[in-house]
Image (tube, helix red, strand yellow):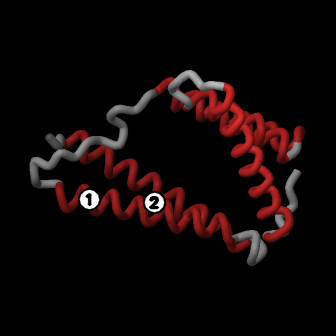
Amino acid sequence: METLGNRTSNLIAAGIALALGAYALSQTGEMSELGAVFPTTAAIVLIIAALALALRVVLRGGKAAEQQSVWSGLEWPRLVGLSITLLAWALLLKPLGFMPAAALGLLAVGVITYRERMGLKALALHLLAGGALLAGFYGLFSVVLRVPLP
């Protein structure tokens, strides 16, 4: 059952996401046309998701809907681990360079989020997919968008 606390927390989360999306969108004006493609797209998706969450709260607000808070069921140790990983990635990006920092970050995210024991075949496939993902992002940003990477 929906509570006033759940509605409030969902509206607060939507407001924060909307503000972050608007801020990110405002910062793209200083970027090159190609360099602004990814941040603009991410900001627009964030704004749309925030508006959708707020609309859902407003439309279902008076009903006893089965609406949960965005915070319910959250695994705090994983969230803290992912936050630390993101911060470490940002701090290591310049000294290590894009590829080593991204590889370490991707490895850390995999360790934090994977819930089951992984066999050798699955590990090899995950490492291969991660390497392809990193190479793809590197190529996209450095070659296609011409964003200088550390």
Residue 92, by quadrant, is top right
Amino acid bearing label 2:
Leu
Mark 2 or mark 1, which is nearer to you?
Answer: 1
Residue occupied by mark 1:
56
Amino acid bearing label 1:
Arg
> As displayed, is residue 82 above or below residue 49?
above
Q: Is residue 48 left or right of residue 22?
A: left
Q: State the residue at coordinates (22%, 60%).
A: 58
Task: Find residue 30 and report its horizontal and vertical position in percent.
Answer: 74, 71
Closest to the observer, 30 or 89: 89
Q: State the residue at coordinates (60%, 25%).
A: 118
Q: Is residue 5 left or right of residue 86?
A: left
How far apart marks 2 and 1 lie (CA) works out to: 15 Å
Tell me the number on the disc at residue 18. 2
Closest to the observer, 72 or 110: 110
Q: State the residue at coordinates (49%, 60%).
A: 46
Q: Residue furthest front?
A: 121
